Image (spheres, rainbow, N blue to C red):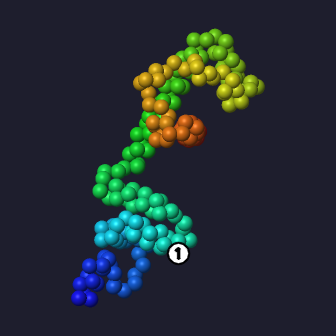
Amino acid sequence: MADDDKESSELPGAGEPARKPSGTANLLHNYTNYMAIEEEYDADVASGLLRKSLERKGVEQSQEGVKSWAAISKAMVTSDVDVGQEFTDAKAKTDALVDRMFTSTVKQASSEPELSSSLDARSTPGGDTEEAHMDDDFDDEEVEVEDDELDTLQEIFGTDDEDDASEQAYDHILKMMEKVD
């Protein structure tokens, strides 16, 4: 009878000599144990035990945070989740949006004589640097890009916060400019 209880509550690797996995192996070990505990008991028990284990290592996490980790981990194990592909798609959309904005601005600059002449003055020796006046002549209202055919920055970067999306787009532009240099 005691053997029956032992068999039903034994986790994978339990009772073996203590060999501590590390890195990815530790992640998989804890994921496997978490799912086994959740299946045998429930999500509250499993997340409570993992939370306690994390606290012993100095990592403070809420019960809901642990449950979120479990849900995300389960999705990655059972679904075709690919954050690298999401990044590639977002980068391509951002590049296309930036290219269209630059193309539209350049077309507009060449069609306006006073703007074109001010751009020429910047590129001559002794003139002010282009970076110093970049924002002076650019007006978001003048960019002729069809809003309905482009994703918003929030959609591209997968965030609900417009300021976060703008900051990520600006960072992306700076990275593109660094690659050109």
Query: In which quadrant of the rendered view does residue 41 lie?
Result: bottom left
Q: Left or right: 83 with respect to 36?
A: right
- Taking the spot 43% from the left edge, 23% from the top edge, the residue there is 148
Disc 1 is placed on an element classified as helix
Task: Tell whether 29 sits left or right of 175.
Answer: left
Q: Is residue 106 above or below residue 27?
A: above
Q: Name the residue type under label 1.
A: Arg
**From the viewer's perspective, is 18 left or right of 108?**
left
Indicate the quadrant containing the C terminus: top left, top right, bottom left or bottom right: top right
Residue at 52% from the left image edge and 75% from the top image edge: 56
Residue 54 position in % (x across, y down):
50, 70
Nearest the viewer among 59 and 108 is: 59
Q: List x then y, in percent, for residue 156.
A: 46, 37
Q: Position of residue 34 (x, y in %)?
A: 37, 69
Residue projecting furthest to the bottom: 2
Q: Is residue 176 in view from this perspective? A: no
Task: Answer above or below: position of 18 versus 72.
Answer: below
58 lies above or below 3: above
Report x, y in % for residue 78.
29, 56
The answer to whether one can see residue 99 in this image is: yes
Residue neighbourhood size for the residue with mark 1, other residues' Cα within 10 Å, grouped as few (<14), some (14–19), many (≥20): few
Name the residue carrying label 1: 56
Residue lying farthest to the right in this orientation: 126
Residue 118, quarter of picture: top right
Q: Quadrant of residue 71?
A: bottom left
